[in-house]
């Protein structure tokens, strides 16, 4: 598809012009590209898009919150010799926190799929999952190549 040919160019353009931008601006740009990519790849109609994007945006914000707030806190506890300094009781509590957050993320994904079933056909949901994975893969590849 044409979107597959244009996306790498757009991502490259953003990476070149985006060095001076802060995190929120970059995240917003990526979000805009993701909207365009997924809408095109899934073939969302205008009606489907007006129902799909509010559901997805709610999911995405909650996922971001869980991943970047909770998981970053976990990463800080795992720096250097922090694990070696934990008691077994502290390590167990920390492990339980990680498991709970991972379970929240899993349940959030299940809720997304259940909610999407009310607005999209199963085929389009599968196309969405593929498009989301493809977009994330391309974004990671582009970020890796930039380094």
Image (cartoon, rainbow, N blue to C red):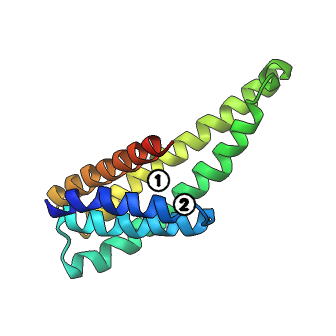
Q: Quadrant of residue 51?
A: bottom left
Q: Is residue 72 above or below residue 115?
A: above
* Drawn side of residue 61 relative to residue 36, left or right: right
Percent position of residue 83, x then y: 78, 23
Q: Which of 143/38 is in front?
A: 143
Q: Is residue 17 above or below residue 139?
A: below
Q: Which mark is residue 63?
A: none
Q: Is residue 29 left or right of residue 42?
A: right
At a point 46% along the width and 48% down the height, the residue shown is 107
Residue ID for mark 2: 62
Q: Secondary structure at mark 1?
A: helix
Nearest to N terminus: mark 2 or mark 1: 2
**Residue 137 placement (x, y as % from top left):** 35, 45
Q: Does residue 77 appear in this view?
A: yes
Do the CB atoms of the residues marked 2 and 1 lie less than 8 Å apart? yes
Say which residue label 1 marks.
108
Identity of the residue drawn at 86% across and 21% down: 85
Q: Label 2's element?
A: helix
Residue 16: x and y in percent read 47, 60
Q: Is 4 on the left or on the right of 31, as rendered?
A: left
Count of numbered circles on the image: 2
10 shown above or below 76: below
The front one of 124 and 7 is 7
Q: CA distance from mark 2 to mark 1?
A: 8 Å
**Toward the viewer: 42 or 28?**
28
| Quarter of the figure with the N terminus | bottom left
Residue 59 in sight: no
**Residue found at x 81% / y 22%:** 81
Depth check: give the residue in front, 102 or 36. Answer: 36
Crowding near the residue tagged with mark 2, few <14, some 14–19, many ≥20 C-alpha atoms within 10 Å: some
Mark 2 or mark 1, whichever is nearer to me:
2
């Amino acid at each position: 598809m044409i979107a597959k040919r244009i996306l790498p160019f757009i991502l490259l353009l953003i990476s070149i012009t985006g060095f001076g931008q802060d995190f929120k601006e970059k995240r917003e740009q990526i979000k805009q590209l993701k909207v365009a990519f997924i809408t095109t790849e899934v073939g969302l109609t205008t009606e489907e898009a007006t129902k799909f994007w509010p559901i997805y945006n709610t999911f995405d914000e909650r996922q971001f919150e869980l991943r970047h707030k909770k998981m970053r806190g976990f990463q800080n506890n795992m720096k250097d010799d922090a694990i070696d300094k934990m008691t077994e009781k502290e390590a167990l509590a920390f492990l339980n926190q990680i498991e709970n957050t991972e379970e929240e993320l899993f349940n959030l994904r299940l809720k997304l799929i259940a909610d999407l079933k009310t607005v999209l056909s199963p085929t389009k949901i599968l196309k969405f999952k593929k498009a989301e994975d493809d977009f994330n893969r391309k974004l990671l590849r582009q970020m890796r190549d930039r380094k």
